[in-house]
C-alpha cells in the first residue's frame, strides 16, 4: 500500500479484526478513522445490484463529480474490467481477504486526462448474506491540476494483490540449512548411495 489513507484504514481494520479473519461491521467506528473518511466507502455485497455504495466519502464523490450513495460500484469501471471487479469482490467476501490494486481513471475527454489511483477492498464479517459489506478506500496517488474541475470517468484495473485475513495466517515455508562435515576442504553431506 502506497497511499496514506489506505495504510491508515488497513491498520485500523487489522486492529479491529484481532484474531478473526475480518472485523464485524459494528466494530468499525467512523470517528476513529475520521482523517481518512473522505476517501472511504462501504459497499453492499450484492452481486445482483452490482454492489451499490452504502456510504461514500466526500473526496471520493468529488473525484467522480457526484454523490455515489446507491450507485453501482461495478458500473464505475470500464466494461472490460467489470467482470474482474465482480470476481475480486467475490474473493474479498468469500475468502475474507483484502485486495489492494492500482487503478487508472480518465476523464473521457478528447485529451484523455488520466489519474493514478490506489484502491483497497476489505471484508467485513456478517451473519447473513443480506448484511454482507465491503469496506474500501480509493484515492489519487498524486493530485493532477484538473482534479476537482473535471470528473473521473470509467476506471481501469491494474495490478492487484491480496492482503490481510487468511493471507496472514499462512506460515511462510521454512528452509532448514543442511549440515555437513568438512573433509579435505570440501563440505560433505550425508546421503546418496550406500556401499
Image (spheres, rainbow, N blue to C red):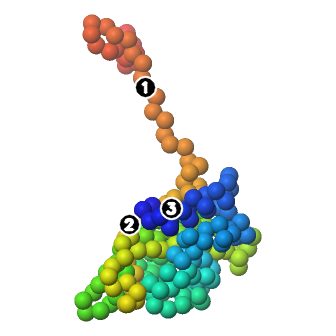
Image quadrant where one finds the N terminus: bottom left
Looking at the picture, tell me which residue is in the foreground, 155 or 50: 155
For the point 64% across and 56% down, the residue is: 15
Residue at 37% of width from left, 80% of height from top? 105
Task: Between residue 37 and residue 72, name the one nearer to us.
Answer: 37
Which residue is pictured at 54% across the width and 90% down the height?
Answer: 67
Pointer 2 residue: 159
Picture layout, residue 21 above or below residue 172: below
Q: In the visual, does 186 lie left or right of 126?
A: left
Q: How many marks?
A: 3
Which label lies toward us, 3 or 1? 3
Give above or below for 145 relative to 149: above
Task: Please tell me in which quadrant of the rendered image residue 70 appears.
Answer: bottom right
Tell me what residue is drawn at x 37 percent, y 90 percent: 150
Query: Can you give x and y, in whole percent of width and height, for residue 34 in the image?
Result: 60, 71
Res 7 label: 3
Q: Which residue is mark 1?
A: 177
- Dots 3, 1 in contact, CB < 8 A: no
Under circle 2, the secondary element is: strand
Residue 89 in view: no
Residue furthest toward the left? Answer: 111
Q: Residue furthest top?
A: 184
Residue 119 appears at what percent x and percent y? 46, 71
Amino acid at each position: 500500500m502506497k497511499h496514506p489513507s489506505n495504510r491508515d484504514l488497513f491498520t485500523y481494520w487489522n486492529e479491529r479484526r484481532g484474531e478473526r479473519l475480518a472485523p464485524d461491521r459494528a466494530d468499525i467506528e467512523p470517528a476513529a478513522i475520521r482523517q481518512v473518511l473522505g476517501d472511504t466507502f462501504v459497499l453492499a455485497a450484492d452481486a445482483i445490484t452490482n454492489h451499490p455504495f452504502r456510504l461514500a466519502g466526500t473526496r471520493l464523490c468529488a473525484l467522480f463529480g457526484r454523490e455515489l450513495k446507491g450507485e453501482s460500484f461495478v458500473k464505475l469501471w470500464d466494461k472490460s474490467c467489470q467482470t474482474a471487479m465482480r470476481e475480486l469482490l467475490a474473493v474479498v467476501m468469500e475468502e475474507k481477504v483484502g485486495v489492494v490494486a492500482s487503478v487508472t481513471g480518465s476523464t473521457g475527454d478528447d485529451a484523455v486526462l488520466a489519474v493514478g489511483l490506489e484502491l483497497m477492498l476489505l471484508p467485513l464479517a456478517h451473519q447473513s448474506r443480506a448484511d454482507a459489506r465491503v469496506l474500501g478506500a480509493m484515492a489519487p496517488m498524486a493530485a493532477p491540476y484538473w482534479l476537482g474541475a473535471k470528473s473521473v470517468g470509467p476506471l481501469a484495473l491494474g495490478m492487484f494483490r491480496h492482503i490481510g485475513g487468511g493471507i496472514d495466517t499462512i506460515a511462510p515455508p521454512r528452509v532448514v540449512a543442511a549440515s555437513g562435515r568438512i573433509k579435505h576442504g570440501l563440505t560433505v553431506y550425508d546421503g546418496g548411495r550406500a556401499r
